[in-house]
Image: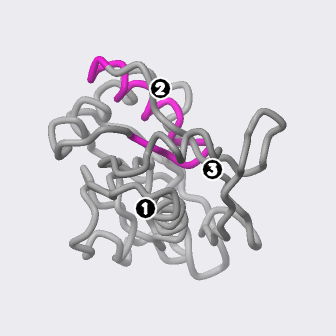
């Protein structure tokens, strides 16, 4: 089963992915779709407030934030990682619960990136906001670094996330019942 999505002037067929027998999500994967990545980056930038830096969680938002930085004429952006890396210093860590990842995971921010964010306006960028767990974890890291969250942005708001007034998104993506019918 698939769901036709219209976003940033483009149509895509998304495969429905069962989470259990009563609930499925539409798999939105921006990886490898250059046309979609560029169009979504442009559309998000048109909605973006004034900012100094952008940050995104690893991994699916990486091509999106990269393209947003490129189109905005910026030479930098920050990532929060799913694992601390040897090149990271004075690492910040926060717990994250995501609908698409089983169990508890953690997100890590490099202390050098955190120092650059201190007192600066930061946009948090993601591909999809569903439960809001990942975006909340990134927001916690930005605030711990002393950054000011200017906006939380995503290509899609899934399910009830579309009812939130604290996120900027391009399109609503429903959840689906076990038979593939939209439920919110």
**Mark count:** 3
- Residue 60 position, x and y percent, is 56, 42
Question: Which residue position holds label 2?
Answer: 33
Q: Earlier in the sequence, mark 2 or mark 3?
A: 2
Local SS, label 2: loop
Q: Disc 1 vs disc 2: which is toward the camera?
A: 1
Q: Are the residues flagged by discs 3 and 1 in contact, CB closer than 8 Å? A: no
Question: Which residue position holds label 3?
Answer: 109
Front-most of 63 and 33?
63
Left-right relation of 80 to 66: right
Residue at x 22% of width, y 36% of height: 45
Left-right relation of 1 to 110: left
Front-most of 37 and 123?
123
Residue at x 29% of width, y 20% of height: 71
For the residues labelled 1 and 2, the Cα–Cα distance comes to 19 Å
Q: Is residue 27 above or below residue 42?
A: below
- Residue 95 position, x and y percent, is 67, 70
Q: Earlier in the sequence, mark 3 or mark 1?
A: 3
Q: Earlier in the sequence, mark 1 or mark 2?
A: 2
- Magenta-tinted stretch: 54-73
Question: Which residue position holds label 1?
Answer: 129
- Residue 11 position, x and y percent, is 30, 37
Q: Is residue 131 above or below residue 43?
A: below
Q: Is residue 59 magenta?
A: yes
Front-most of 70 and 111?
111
Badge 1: residue crowd in 10 Å (few <14, some 14–19, many ≥20): many
Left-right relation of 179 to 72: right
């Amino acid at each position: 089963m698939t769901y036709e999505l219209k976003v940033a002037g483009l149509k895509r067929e998304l495969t429905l992915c069962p989470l259990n027998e009563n609930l499925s999500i539409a798999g939105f994967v921006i990886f490898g779709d250059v046309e979609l990545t560029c169009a979504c980056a442009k559309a998000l930038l048109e909605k973006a407030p004034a900012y100094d830096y952008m940050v995104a969680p690893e991994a699916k938002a990486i091509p999106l934030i990269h393209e947003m930085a490129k189109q905005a004429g910026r030479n930098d952006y920050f990532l929060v990682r799913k694992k601390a890396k040897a090149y990271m210093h004075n690492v910040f860590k926060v717990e994250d619960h995501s609908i698409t990842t089983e169990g508890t995971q953690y997100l890590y921010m490099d202390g050098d990136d955190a120092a650059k964010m201190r007192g600066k306006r930061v946009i948090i960028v993601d591909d999809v906001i569903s439960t809001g767990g990942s975006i909340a974890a990134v927001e916690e890291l930005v605030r711990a670094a002393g950054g000011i969250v200017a906006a939380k942005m995503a290509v899609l708001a899934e399910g009830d996330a579309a009812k939130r007034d604290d996120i900027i998104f391009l399109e609503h993506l429903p959840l689906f019942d076990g038979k593939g019918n939209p439920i919110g």
